[in-house]
Image (tube, rainbow, N blue to C red):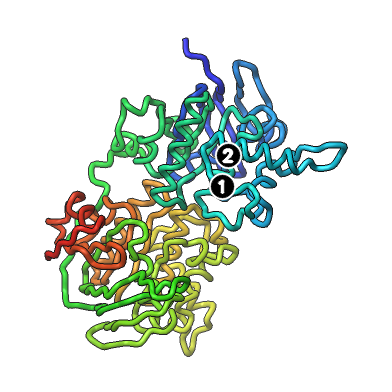
């Protein structure tokens, strides 16, 4: 009989008007990575907060067992002392403190009541050495990249002798190289007997790193299976409650005339004089077309769109034409005025004002457009917002709901609505489904398809190659700031696109 390090049985948790967890059961074995997946709102975060002591007993129903003994965590500290550490997507590090100080924050070794700095740094170094990390323990955390900050969080968890580590969307902001480093460390921890709960919307990563997968839907446990005995389509079907035969909608785009053209665009790195992030790139986007831009991290995809939109700090040159007319863009307002919209890759930082309402966020870029001569701004604004919320199926009590309280998918719909209200001629989409669940992704995909069918020209950047290939009518590929390939939809295979993304030039379409 397999013994469980952790068992959560028949867990229930309710909020006013909502049953967040309805009899959920979950177990974890020592030396295992157990993935917990489900759409936003499925109950994953609530379950973890019960385990972490954020929701103490008796605020929930059911039982929690640790090594067979019933436990009732009264607080976060109580959970931590039992050997449970949670690493949230929003990291908890103090940016101005050193790596070592963060690792032992609140638990500093002391001698005669005074912090023993020599021991603190020595123990921090040993933890990093055990993880095969070459990070300066004296460096302020703010000097580290997100990937290394994530690893410092793991070291902090291990400093508490954690037997169970929960990782919530750990790769959301990491590069491919940082993901590989993280996975190497997780494999080492697994070999040492540490048990991990891995929460992610990235199913390819779930299948790569996990031993078992549990699916939650609508606050219920739907299925637990060994990773090698299932596949992505089956997991997706259980997550969304329906068969997913075709993730991407069937494209019926009627490509029209050229709406947008970029000629010979060059962008310099603002921190390295003379270094080009984008090197003489040109492309066109047609009415009713989705143009995909593929490439590896650092290929210049996002920098290209930001520069065209007037939002990149580096020096730039080249020509931009909308409807055949050359335009000058020095700042984002110039781009908006000339019919260009831009859904950025970081919606929380650049796309939304999180403490403002859905309505205020929707109309930020088009207040003049929604105001009429004989209608108050408030009336016009509300009417425009209500229409957009209905068309995009934004799930919220009202347009006066604060944007920061929405799920990732609904936040992204608000950003999309903001730009659609400007009536753009061309819409740039940079990582439009980053950090949202499978069901919300499908809704975004369907909306992109509908917009193209309505005649909008769309330029799509995504790190997920299946997304680029599944949505695009045409694909261009960048490598080190240069166009290395162009493909019609029928020619754009993963192998051909990746060949160009790694520097093997090819021109077609």
Q: Would you call the spot at circle 1 few (<14 residues within 10 Å), some (14-19), or many (20 or more)? A: some
- The image quadrant that residue 281 belongs to is bottom left
- Which of the numbered marks, if any, corresponds to residue 180? none
Instruction: Give the Cα separation between the discs numbered 1 and 2.
Output: 7 Å
Residue 288, position as x, y percentages in the image? 21, 69
Residue 303 in view in this figure: yes
Question: Along the horizontal axis of the image, is 220 left or right of 13?
Answer: left
Label 1 sits on residue: 135
Say how many tags the image has.
2
The residue wearing badge 2 is 128
Q: Where is the C terminus found, in terms of image quarters?
A: bottom left
**Helix, strand, or loop for circle 1?**
loop
Q: Is residue 330 above or below residue 45?
A: below
Q: Are marks 1 and 2 in contact (CB under 8 Å)?
A: yes
Q: Residue furthest right?
A: 112
| Residue at 28%, 38% in the rendered image | 243
Is residue 420 among the parts visible in the rendering? no
């Amino acid at each position: 009989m397999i013994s469980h390090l952790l068992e959560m049985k028949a867990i229930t948790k309710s909020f006013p008007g909502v049953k967040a967890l309805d009899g959920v059961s979950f177990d974890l074995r020592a030396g295992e990575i157990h993935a917990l997946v489900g759409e936003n709102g499925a109950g994953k975060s609530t379950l973890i907060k019960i385990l972490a002591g954020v929701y103490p007993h008796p605020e929930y129903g059911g039982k929690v067992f640790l090594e067979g003994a019933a436990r009732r965590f009264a607080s976060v500290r109580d959970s931590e002392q039992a050997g449970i550490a949670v690493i949230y997507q929003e990291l908890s590090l103090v940016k101005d403190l050193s790596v070592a100080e963060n690792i032992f924050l609140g638990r500093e070794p002391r001698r005669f009541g005074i912090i023993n700095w020599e021991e603190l740094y020595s123990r921090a170094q040993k933890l990093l050495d055990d993880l095969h990390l070459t990070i300066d323990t004296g460096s302020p955390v703010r000097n580290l990249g997100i990937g290394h900050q994530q690893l410092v969080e793991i070291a902090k968890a291990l400093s508490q002798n954690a037997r169970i580590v929960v990782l919530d969307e750990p790769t959301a902001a990491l590069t491919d190289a940082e993901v590989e480093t993280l996975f190497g460390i997780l494999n080492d921890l697994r070999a040492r007997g540490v048990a991990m709960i891995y929460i992610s919307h990235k199913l390819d990563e779930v299948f790569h790193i996990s031993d078992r997968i549990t699916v939650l839907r609508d606050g219920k446990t739907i299925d637990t299976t060994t990773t090698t005995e299932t596949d992505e389509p089956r997991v997706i079907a259980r997550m969304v409650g329906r068969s997913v035969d075709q993730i991407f909608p069937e494209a019926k785009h009627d490509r029209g005339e050229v709406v947008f053209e970029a000629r010979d665009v060059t962008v310099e790195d603002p921190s390295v004089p003379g270094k080009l992030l984008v090197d003489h790139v040109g492309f066109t986007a047609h009415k009713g077309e989705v143009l995909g831009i593929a490439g590896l991290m650092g290929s210049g995809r996002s920098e290209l769109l930001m520069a065209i939109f007037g939002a990149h700090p580096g020096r730039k040159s080249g020509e931009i034409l909308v409807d055949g007319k050359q335009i000058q863009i020095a700042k984002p307002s110039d781009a908006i005025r000339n019919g260009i919209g831009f859904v950025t890759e970081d919606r929380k930082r650049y796309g939304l004002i999180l403490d403002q309402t859905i309505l205020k966020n929707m109309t930020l870029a088009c207040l003049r457009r929604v105001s009429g001569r004989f209608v108050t701004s408030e009336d016009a604004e509300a009417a425009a917002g209500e229409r957009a919320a209905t068309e995009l199926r934004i799930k919220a009590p009202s347009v006066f709901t604060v944007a920061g309280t929405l799920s990732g998918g609904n936040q992204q719909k608000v950003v999309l609505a903001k730009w659609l209200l400007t009536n753009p001629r061309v819409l740039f989409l940079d990582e439009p489904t980053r950090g949202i669940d499978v069901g919300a992704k499908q809704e975004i995909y369907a909306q992109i398809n509908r917009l193209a069918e309505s005649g909008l020209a769309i330029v799509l950047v995504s790190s997920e190659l299946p997304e680029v290939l599944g949505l695009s009518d045409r694909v261009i590929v960048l490598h080190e700031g240069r166009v290395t390939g162009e493909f019609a939809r029928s020619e754009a295979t993963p192998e051909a696109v990746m060949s160009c993304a790694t520097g093997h030039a090819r021109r077609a379409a």
